[in-house]
Image (tube, grey):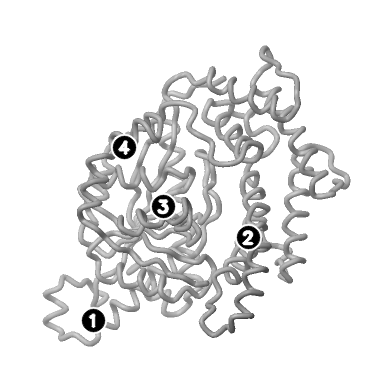
């Protein structure tokens, strides 16, 4: 059922969360701290009071807490957009907290009108900045980002249209007093941000413990003296062979592990597309296939049931149980969509090793893998994208304007990630 979860900003809970944040970061997030790059707070402050969507990369499940921590330093609270399913975690307790801390839901890929209306309202009012993670999925890697969804740019342009409509009904002198620019109304900004999770201390011992646990779970002999690279490759080979048997799949002309992994991902997605009667664009990336299929599942699971009979609801509920099991297949593909043979050996930082092991733990052990030690999250803020600069193009060619803004956002986040990596002391294993 398309059950929209609206934001229910509760000032007392914002205050309570702020007071308890240091304890949460220390104990629940295992000593996580943030390091804000020089000039980042100043760049962020330039948009105080403006109509702003904040778009960080999404490499970790703790990104919302990191954004909240940054907000404390910046002296601002935010609204957040989150996928509808996260509101059901922990039997709805997670959703209660999210809503009362300013978060609202969106069903990805669906015509979630209430969510879209809320986004446009928040951006056009401009009372608080709105945080949206444009990757749409948790990438679980720090060095690069996944291709971005176009929703951030499209929703921001829609808010621009609302602002223009309001301006057209106002008097000329009122528009001038409001500080409107040459557009005749106040523009919407997209603020790129970058988070980079690092382990400043040596976590080799913790990583070896993780390797041992995975080797034992997969029935392998524990090789205490083996290198990280060789042990990870052996784990990957065993895991891949197990999944190939699970999906009854035999790779064709696969000359290396990368070919096998890619073929298995394609097989899983094409098989699911057949079950859901979805046509996948052959030239599209696998991540785009994942989004199409996830949207199909979301459309069915959150379908509006108000016009259904009781019997139709029962039949729908039965099918819904089956459909929900397919999310695991999609999550499995996303979990390994950007990992390849050589990912660790080409740059064997302890962060990359931790990323790969965390993916394996998610697959083999289930649940979310905990941090491998105390983390320092580097945060940078890019130059804001003024959608007013693209407004005339948007009027002529909406798709092109959205694509250009999305590409610029991708480039800016990628630049910041690379620059932060160059500024830190890297530990190799």
Residue under label 2: 324
Instruction: Name the side, left or right, on which 272 lies relative to 176.
Output: right
Residue 399 placed where, x, y %?
51, 73
Disc nearer the start of the sequence (4/2): 4
| Mark 2 surroundings within 10 Å by alpha-carbon count, few (fewer than 14), some (14 through 19), many (20 or more) | some
Spatial CA distance of label 3 from label 4 is: 31 Å
Spatial CA distance of label 4 from label 2 is: 41 Å
Disc nearer the start of the sequence (2/1): 1
Where residue 167 is drawn, which disc sits there? 1
Residue 285 placed where, x, y %?
66, 57
Residue under label 4: 37
Spatial CA distance of label 3 from label 1 is: 39 Å
Residue 270 placed where, x, y %?
76, 60
- Secondary structure, mark 1, is helix
Residue occupying image coordinates x 62% and y 66%: 297
Where residue 275 is drawn, which disc sits there? none
- Secondary structure, mark 4, is loop
Cβ atoms at labels 4 and 1 below 8 Å apart:
no
Instruction: Name the side, left or right, on which 97 lies relative to 285.
Output: left
Q: Is residue 295 above or below residue 363?
A: below
Cβ atoms at labels 3 and 1 below 8 Å apart:
no
Disc nearer the start of the sequence (3/4): 4
- Secondary structure, mark 2, is helix
Spatial CA distance of label 4 from label 1 is: 37 Å
Residue under label 3: 94
Residue 280 placed where, x, y %?
71, 66
Residue occupying image coordinates x 31% and y 47%: 68
């Amino acid at each position: 059922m398309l059950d929209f979860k609206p934001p229910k900003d509760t000032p007392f809970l914002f205050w309570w969360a702020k007071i308890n944040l240091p304890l949460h970061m220390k104990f629940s997030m295992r000593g996580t701290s943030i390091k804000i790059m020089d000039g980042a707070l100043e760049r962020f402050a330039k948009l105080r009071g403006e109509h702003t969507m904040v778009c960080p990369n999404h490499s970790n499940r703790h990104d919302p807490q990191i954004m909240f921590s940054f907000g404390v330093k910046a002296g601002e609270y935010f609204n957040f957009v989150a996928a509808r399913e996260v509101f059901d975690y922990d039997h709805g307790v997670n959703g209660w907290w999210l809503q009362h801390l300013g978060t609202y839901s969106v069903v990805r890929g669906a015509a979630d009108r209430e969510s879209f209306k809320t986004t446009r309202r928040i951006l056009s009012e401009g009372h608080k900045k709105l945080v949206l993670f444009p990757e749409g999925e948790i990438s679980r890697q720090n060095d690069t980002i996944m291709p971005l969804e176009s929703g951030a740019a499209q929703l921001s342009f829609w808010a621009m249209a609302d602002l223009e409509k309001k301006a057209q009904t106002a008097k000329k002198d009122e528009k001038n007093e409001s500080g409107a620019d040459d557009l005749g109304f106040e523009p919407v900004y997209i603020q790129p941000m970058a988070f980079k999770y690092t382990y400043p201390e040596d976590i080799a011992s913790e990583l070896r413990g993780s390797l041992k646990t995975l080797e034992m779970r997969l029935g392998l002999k524990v090789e205490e003296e083996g290198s990280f690279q060789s042990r990870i490759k052996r784990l990957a080979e065993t895991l891949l062979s197990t999944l190939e048997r699970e999906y009854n799949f035999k790779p064709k002309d696969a000359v290396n592990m990368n070919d096998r992994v890619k073929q298995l991902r394609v097989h899983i997605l094409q098989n699911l597309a057949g079950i859901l009667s979805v046509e996948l664009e052959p030239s599209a990336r696998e991540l785009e296939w994942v989004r199409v299929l996830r949207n199909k599942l979301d459309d069915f699971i959150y379908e509006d049931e108000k016009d259904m009979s009781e019997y139709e609801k029962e039949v729908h509920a039965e099918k819904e149980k089956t459909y929900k099991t397919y999310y695991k297949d999609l999550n499995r593909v996303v979990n390994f969509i950007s990992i390849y043979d050589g990912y660790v050996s080409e740059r064997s930082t302890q962060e990359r090793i931790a990323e790969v092991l965390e993916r394996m733990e998610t697959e083999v052990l289930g649940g979310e893998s905990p941090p491998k030690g105390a983390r320092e999250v580097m945060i940078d803020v890019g130059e804001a994208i003024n959608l007013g600069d693209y407004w005339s193009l948007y009027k002529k060619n909406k798709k092109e304007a959205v694509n250009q803004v999305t590409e610029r956002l991708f480039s800016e986040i990628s630049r910041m990630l690379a620059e932060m990596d160059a500024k830190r002391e890297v530990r190799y294993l």
